Image (cartoon, rainbow, N blue to C red):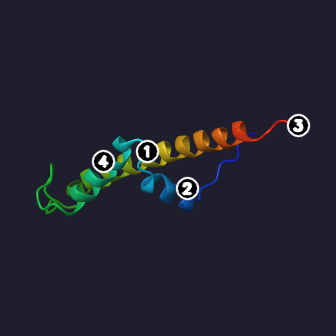
Amino acid sequence: MRNKSFTPNWLGFVRYLRDPNADWKPKLALAVAILYLIWPIDLIPDFAPIIGWLDDIGITALAIAYVVHASNLYLKQKQHLVEDEQPKE
């Protein structure tokens, strides 16, 4: 059974973001989402109540989901590399 947790592995997430050998596309997606949040020009203007904020929420949620998925794959790959390097008894 898979251990699903609602709390992210923050240390692993930070390791993923700081590793220069990790995939750059999720990092770029996160940076673009953050810039989109602070940029004054949106696909749907924010002065339209609720609808204007939905595009910000959607883009940010997609970017976060993409980065979390990529960091989980990164951590699994690193774990397999560590297990393969350990001597067999």
Mark 2 or 1: the one toward you: 1
76 to the left or right of 51: right
Q: Which residue is mark 2?
A: 12
The Cα atoms of the two marked residues, 2 and 1, are separated by 14 Å
State which tag comes first along the sequence, 3 or 2: 2
Query: What's the residue type where badge 2 is placed?
Result: Gly
Q: Quadrant of residue 31?
A: bottom left
Query: What's the residue type where badge 4 is placed?
Result: Leu
The Cα atoms of the two marked residues, 4 and 2, are separated by 18 Å
What is the secondary structure assignment of the residue under circle 3?
Answer: loop
Q: Position of residue 28 (x, y in %)?
A: 30, 47
Q: Which residue is mark 1?
A: 21
The Cα atoms of the two marked residues, 4 and 1, are separated by 14 Å
Disc on res. 89 = 3
Dot 4 crowding, Cα within 10 Å, few <14, some 14–19, many 20+: few
State which tag comes first along the sequence, 4 or 2: 2
* Label 1–label 3 contact, CB within 8 A: no
Q: Position of residue 15 (x, y in %)?
A: 50, 56
Nearer to the camera, 21 or 87 = 87
Q: Which residue is mark 4?
A: 28
Which residue is at a point 15% across and 48% down the rendered structure image?
43
Question: Looking at the rendering, in which quadrant would you find the C terminus?
Answer: top right
- Most extreme residue toward the right is 89
State which tag comes first along the sequence, 2 or 1: 2
Dot 1 crowding, Cα within 10 Å, few <14, some 14–19, many 20+: few
Which residue is at a point 45% across and 52% down the rendered structure image?
19
Which residue is at a point 49% across and 43% down the rendered structure image?
69
Dot 3 crowding, Cα within 10 Å, few <14, some 14–19, many 20+: few
Q: Position of residue 10 (x, y in %)?
A: 54, 61
* Label 3–label 4 contact, CB within 8 A: no
Query: What's the residue type where badge 1 is placed?
Result: Asn
